[in-house]
Image: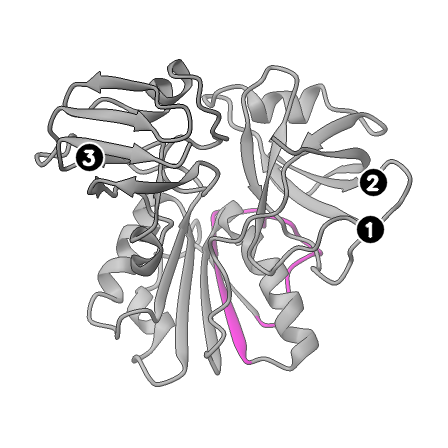
Amino acid sequence: MRLIRTVVREAVAAGPGIRRLVLMDPEGWPLPRQKPGAHIDLHPPDGLVRAYSLCGDPAQQDRYVVAVKREEAGRGGSLWLHDALEVGAEIGVSLPRCTFPLAPDATRHVFIAGGIGVTPFLSMAAALERAGGNYVLHLLHRGALPLPGHLPRHAVLHDTSAAPRPALADLLGAPAPGLHAYCCGPNGLIEAFEAATRDWPSGQAHVEHFVPPPLPPDPEARPFTLVLARSGASAELPAGAPLLPAIKALGGEVEASCEGGICGACKVRWLEGPPLHRDRVLQPEARREYLMACVAGCAGPRLVLDL
């Protein structure tokens, strides 16, 4: 697993329960390039990996900027990043991954953000500002703003503590050629967005989760043989068994972060299947070749992975 050494150069409060971190190379060298909408994994000492959207200007190649919301009931990662990580400390990060890109053929972009879900849109807006792109950001928040002072100029604020949440269909408008809509936020907001765009043309509505949605048992799951092609190691797995622990037990190495099918860290090439795809990341064409090991299953008797 390739990690990039970074040093915390800045750590400041940036809204209610939010800490904004600026990470740079220890010697100030440029970091691997980031695309608008990309995210990185942070690797704290406890070994649990956390994914965060990059919310800085992608043109600033000497830094990665993330914003961490304090989650008292989370796995503990946000608490460590708030309470223990100090300016000057080193932390390993992954190469940037972009599973939530700007649509290259879009002529107009409508962003719907819920609270801290605004983070991926800040890098997108910075890139569009530079290119003269057409966009609007609708930020739904309760009370104090997330990341005040860092919001783009085409941001429309909706304080849902002062008024009911506006109808998303009204914010989005009617579908049209070249119009692409994007949503990031709590699961309830994403569900409302998906309902509002259900009849939109395929590929013009995009979502990114920052919390993995519930994953019910798949009725098509069946017992299967898992095979790692490079080593020849295999195991018999019952229906619905998770792949990641089985892969690791067989000696395979796969990166993992969210373990809920939303971050793209555990992408693996499959050679024989067919797999059951349960992620929220891979596009249909990518699923012909890859699966997300944290949530995938198998619909046949044998699943062979390129590991």
The residue tagged with tag 2: helix, strand or loop? loop
Read off the magenta span: 134-154
The residue mark sitting in front, 3 or 1, is: 3
Q: Residue at position x 36%, y 72% from top? A: 172
Give me the disc on residue 30. Answer: 1
Give me the disc on residue 144. Answer: none
- Rendering quarter of residue 202: bottom left
Q: Quadrant of the N terminus?
A: top right
* Neighbourhood count class around disc 2 (C-alpha, 10 Å): few under 14, some 14–19, many 20 upward: some
The residue mark sitting in front, 2 or 3, is: 3
Q: Residue at position x 34%, y 19% from top? A: 233
Q: Amino acid at mark 2?
A: Asp
- For the residue pair 128 and 166, the one nearer the viewer reads as 128
Residue 232 visible in the snapshot: yes
Horizontal and vertical percent for residue 80?
A: 64, 20
- Tag 1–tag 2 contact (CB < 8 Å): yes
Residue under numbered circle 2: 25
| Distance Cα–Cα, label 1 vs label 2 | 7 Å
* Neighbourhood count class around disc 3 (C-alpha, 10 Å): few under 14, some 14–19, many 20 upward: many
The residue tagged with tag 1: helix, strand or loop? loop
The residue tagged with tag 3: helix, strand or loop? strand
Give me the disc on residue 298. Answer: 3
Horizontal and vertical percent for residue 91?
A: 73, 28
Q: Amino acid at mark 1?
A: Pro
